[in-house]
Image (cartoon, rainbow, N blue to C red):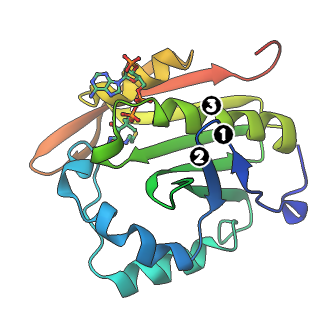
Amino acid sequence: MIAFDRYASPFIATERLTLEPRGALHAERLFASFSDPELYTFLPGDPPLSLEAMRERYQRLETRRSTDGKALWLNWAARQESGTYVGVVEATVHADASAHVAYFVFRPFQRQGFAAEVVEAVLAHLKNDVGVETARALLDTRNEASWRLLERLRFKRDRTIKNADHFKGSKSDEYEYVRDLRGAR
Ligand SMILES: CC(C)(COP(=O)(O)OP(=O)(O)OC[C@H]1O[C@@H](n2cnc3c(N)ncnc32)[C@H](O)[C@@H]1OP(=O)(O)O)[C@@H](O)C(=O)NCCC(=O)NCCS
């Protein structure tokens, strides 16, 4: 594993997109897309309260480190050549060489393979440049788009966590998916 204090987040090129390390500048560019309530159906979060609140949060994320320094907080905004942003991808890297990934693709761009493309590119970066060995994802069991995406990306369902959370008036059971990044891709 790379020493966390030596990590610098790169731009990552995929077939159709550039993944830009997300920072305060992206708040303005992403605010309207993240204001879509449909994105949060199976997530405990809600659309941002204001552009200013979003900017402050993105500013804090620019350190790429958790406050206790024990994890890397990585996040990228995915931009088309035209300048349009299609979504974001996030990864929290832990000292035990595992990482949790999360992803959003804005509605006008869904079902075009963008999530698969950006998550696969971030997994390659985590494996080759950071030394991550195991990727994990936690998601609401009702989030079919998310678990189908993970299965397409060769993640395996590892466990079901009953009553993991409660939001938007109902309980949330969660799946944890895992992919071993060691060995052949
Ligand atoms: C989950 C999400 C990121 C998928 O993004 P996407 O770009 O549409 O996914 P892709 O086009 O790369 O799809 C890859 C595969 O996932 C599956 N999939 C994606 N969306 C699906 C849907 N709505 N229903 C069923 N399967 C779906 C399909 O198997 C698809 O492959 P196929 O199109 O060849 O059949 C997107 O729906 C999203 O942002 N949702 C809201 C935020 C969210 O819940 N994020 C997950 C947090 S854990």
Q: Nearer the viewer, residue 56 or 36?
A: 36
User: In the image, residue 86 lies at what x, y percent?
Assistant: 43, 50
Crowd rating for badge 3 (residues with CA inside 10 Å; few <14, some 14–19, many 20+): some
C-alpha distance separating marks 1 and 3? 9 Å
Task: Tell me whether the residue at label 1 lies in contact with that at label 2, contact meaning CB atoms closer than 8 angstroms.
Answer: yes
Precedes in sequence: disc 1 or disc 3: 1
Distance of label 1 from label 2 (alpha carbons): 5 Å
Does dot 2 land on a helix, a strand or a loop?
strand
- Position in image of residue 49 (x %, y %): 26, 77
Q: Quadrant of residue 130?
A: top right
Question: What numbered label is drawn on residue 120?
Answer: 3
Residue 139's place in the image compared with 59, above or below, is: above
Q: Quadrant of the C terminus?
A: top right
Whether the residues at callouts 1 and 3 have beta carbons within 8 Å, the answer is yes
Q: Is residue 129 visible?
A: yes
Question: The residue tagged with tag 3: helix, strand or loop?
Answer: helix
Can the viewer see residue 158?
A: no
Instruction: Provide residue 112's location: percent of width, then percent of height.
Output: 40, 31
Kindly identify the residue that appears in the image at 76 percent across and 60 percent down: 9
The amino acid marked with disc number 2 is: Leu
Q: Do labels 2 and 3 touch, CB within 8 Å? A: no
* Residue underneath mark 1: 14
Examine the rendered structure and indicate whether residue 147 appears above or below residue 8.
Answer: above
Mark 2 closeness class: few <14, some 14–19, many ≥20 residues within 10 Å = many
